[in-house]
């Protein structure tokens, strides 16, 4: 049905009970017009409160009355179809936003948040019910990685210039939950049919892993250059050079411990030249490992250029170190790279 036209006074169920049943029990939004000879004001008010779309009173010239009724029916049906189309478009937009892998926030022309998808909720730490209606600057708080200073809101720049704006590299998003993320984003104007800016859409994504990996690689290249020009390394002052190397390795690869071990006169004993602990910033040396206590580990060193033990406690190449080294220091992963001279493993 396109619409319901109902009298008020009817047997068994009056017009208001009929309306209430449709709205509450059937959850129907069909246009509902009360057309009745009962002219009491309280009936009209109750009908409208229950969700009637029109309340028309009978009486007078039938031709005129039915003409008014026809107009009311046509208007309410058209209004309902328009509303249904808008609701469908709104639902399609919601589904589209939720299916986008990037975070999306849309604002009005004043920079007030109107929409956001689930990814935006996750990255900003804001529930959309709380975020909608707030200035974007409250929900989308950003700063520069190098300076740590707040960055002007990109929406303001879009509204001012009317063009797409990209954030600078290294932009940090400060989540409501205290989480900081590196993000890449762009903001673009939303225009109406007259090409006037009606709002701004902001699309951003978390690039923390890529950004930090890129920064680590850059730092590692710098470390190689630094060590290649380090006087202690060039002059062969082993003790000092080892301290420089272990510190550089630990800090550039973000590990807890870094050390250099060399074989003695035979390959049955490994002696620590230097071990650097990141947490304490301390160096120590002189510790020894003997092949008789760790035969599988020593054999792995002899036969592998590197031992990437992601699960060091269960990896057969490093599991022997569990009781004496891994468990006491709560070490989960190890990476050993062999030192070679003339094709022979020397540490």
Image (cartoon, rainbow, N blue to C red):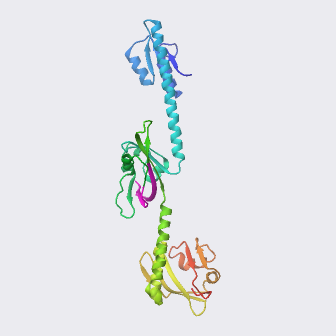
Which of the pair 86/224 is nearer the observer? 224
Q: Which residues are magenta?
A: 167-187
Residue 346 lies, in percent from the top left, at: 58, 87
Residue, x 47% and y 86% (percent of image)?
233
Instruction: Pick the quarter of the image with the C terminus.
Output: bottom right
Residue 198 lies, in percent from the top left, at: 41, 40
Where is 335 relative to 126, above or below?
below
Q: Residue furthest left?
A: 149
| Residue 245 part of the magenta segment | no
| Residue 173 part of the magenta segment | yes
Which of the pair 251/20 is nearer the observer? 251
Q: Is residue 315 left or right of residue 255?
A: right
Q: Is residue 284 visible?
A: no
Q: How many marks?
A: 0
Instruction: Pick the quarter of the image with the N terminus.
Output: top right
Which of the pair 160/310 is nearer the observer? 160
Where is 239 relative to 114, above or below?
below
Q: Is residue 59 visible?
A: yes
Residue 100 lies, in percent from the top left, at: 53, 48
Residue, x 37% and y 16% (percent of image)?
41
Residue 273 lies, in percent from the top left, at: 50, 87
Q: Is residue 325 left or right of residue 68?
A: right
Q: Is residue 114 left or right of residue 316?
A: left
Where is 150 relative to 236, above or below?
above
Residue 151 falls in image quadrant = bottom left
Which of the pair 47/95 is nearer the observer? 95
Q: Residue furthest bottom?
A: 265
């Amino acid at each position: 049905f396109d619409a319901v036209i109902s009298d008020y006074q009817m047997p068994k169920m009056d017009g208001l009970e009929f309306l209430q049943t449709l709205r509450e029990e059937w959850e129907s939004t069909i246009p509902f017009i009360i057309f009745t000879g009962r002219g009491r004001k309280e009936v009209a008010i109750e009908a409208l409160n229950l969700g009637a779309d029109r309340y028309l009173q009978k009486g007078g010239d039938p031709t005129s009355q039915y003409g008014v009724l026809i107009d009311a029916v046509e208007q309410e049906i058209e209004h309902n179809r328009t509303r249904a189309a808008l609701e469908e478009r709104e639902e399609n937009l919601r589904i589209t936003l939720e299916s986008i892998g990037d975070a999306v926030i849309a604002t009005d022309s004043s920079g007030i948040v109107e929409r956001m998808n689930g990814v935006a909720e996750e990255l900003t730490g804001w529930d959309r019910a709380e975020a909608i209606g707030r200035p974007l600057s409250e929900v989308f708080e950003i700063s520069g990685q190098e300076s740590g200073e707040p960055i002007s809101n990109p929406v303001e720049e879009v509204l001012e210039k009317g063009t797409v704006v990209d954030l600078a590299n290294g932009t940090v998003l400060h989540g409501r939950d205290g989480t900081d993320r590196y993000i890449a984003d762009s903001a673009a104007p939303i225009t109406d049919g007259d090409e006037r800016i009606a709002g701004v859409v902001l699309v951003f994504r978390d690039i923390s892993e890529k950004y930090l990996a890129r920064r680590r690689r850059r730092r590692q290249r710098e470390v190689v250059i630094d060590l290649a020009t380090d006087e202690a390394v060039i002059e062969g002052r082993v003790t000092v050079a080892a301290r420089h190397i272990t510190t550089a390795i630990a800090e550039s690869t973000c590990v807890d411990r870094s050390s250099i071990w060399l074989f003695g006169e035979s390959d049955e004993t490994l002696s620590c030249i230097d071990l650097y602990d990141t947490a304490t910033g301390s160096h120590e040396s002189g510790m020894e490992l003997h092949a008789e206590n760790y035969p599988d580990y020593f054999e792995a060193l002899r036969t592998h250029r590197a031992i990437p033990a992601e699960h060091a406690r269960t990896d057969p190449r490093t599991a022997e170190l569990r009781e004496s080294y891994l468990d006491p220091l709560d070490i989960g992963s190890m990476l050993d790279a062999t030192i070679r001279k003339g094709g022979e493993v020397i540490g």
